[in-house]
Image (cartoon, helix red, strand yellow):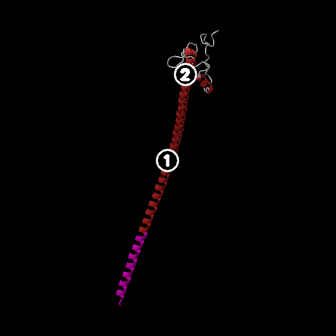
Amino acid sequence: MDGMTVLWIVVALAALVIVVALIAGATRKSSKRRAERNRQEAYEQEQQARTSAVRAEKQQAAADEVEARSRKAQAVADEKAAEARRLAAGADERREAAADARTESDEHRARAEELHPDQSTPHAATWGKEGEPTDGHWTDGQHPDDPRRQSAQSEPRDDPRRQPEQPEPRDDHPKHLKQ
């Protein structure tokens, strides 16, 4: 091997080392760029995750608020439905009481007609054809034996400003007639 061949081998090896060094440097630079891009993308993903988490929290809070309002509205509706049932039951009770009072009135009228079939007594004359009293004390509910007066006295008065009505005495009523 002569000196020229050795020189060419050394030059070739030097060129090879330079090429390998350039490739290694380019690869390292490319890796650094890729790592920087990955860091930047990771940072952007973290920011988006935080933004999405905040948005999710707001949506959850809004959903919880709507659910709470819904439960409150349902509770109010249930309360109103219960009050409507109570009022309906009270109305049914009052209808039954009215029917019972009518039945009792009819029984008393029938008994009065049995006892006074000729209707010659002043008390029997206070009833009309339809079983309704014609005497003013009966029609205004102020007669002492009127069942409406008894039920009105047993019911509590809600309005403290309400003054009880005082009946005016009638001179033509059998109780007031002088004998």
Mark 1 neighbour density, 10 Å: few (under 14) some (14–19) many (20 or more): few
Which mark identifies residue 63?
1
Residue 20 picture location, percent across and down: 40, 76
Can you tell which of label 1 and label 2 is closer to the viewer?
2
Residue 134, position in %: x, y? 54, 15
Q: Quadrant of the C terminus?
A: top right
Q: Judge whether 142 appears above or below 15 on screen.
A: above
Rounded to the nearest angstrom, the CA distance separating label 1 from label 2 is 69 Å
Please state which of residues 70 and 63 is positioned toward the viewer in this rendering. Answer: 70
Tell me the chief SS of the magenta region. helix
Q: Which stretch did the figure color magenta?
A: 1-28
Dot 2 falls on a residue whose secondary structure is helix
Amino acid under disc 2: Ala
Q: 151 or 84, which is in the foreground?
A: 151
Q: Is residue 8 above or below residue 31?
A: below
Q: Secondary structure at mark 1?
A: helix
Relative depth, front residue between 131 and 82: 131
Q: Is residue 15 magenta?
A: yes
Locate the N terminus by quadrant: bottom left
Q: Which residue is mark 2?
A: 110
Mark 2 is surrounded, within 10 Å at the Cα level, by few (under 14), some (14 to 19) or many (20 or more) other residues, namely some
Residue 100: numbered disc:
none
Q: Residue at the bottom extreme?
A: 1
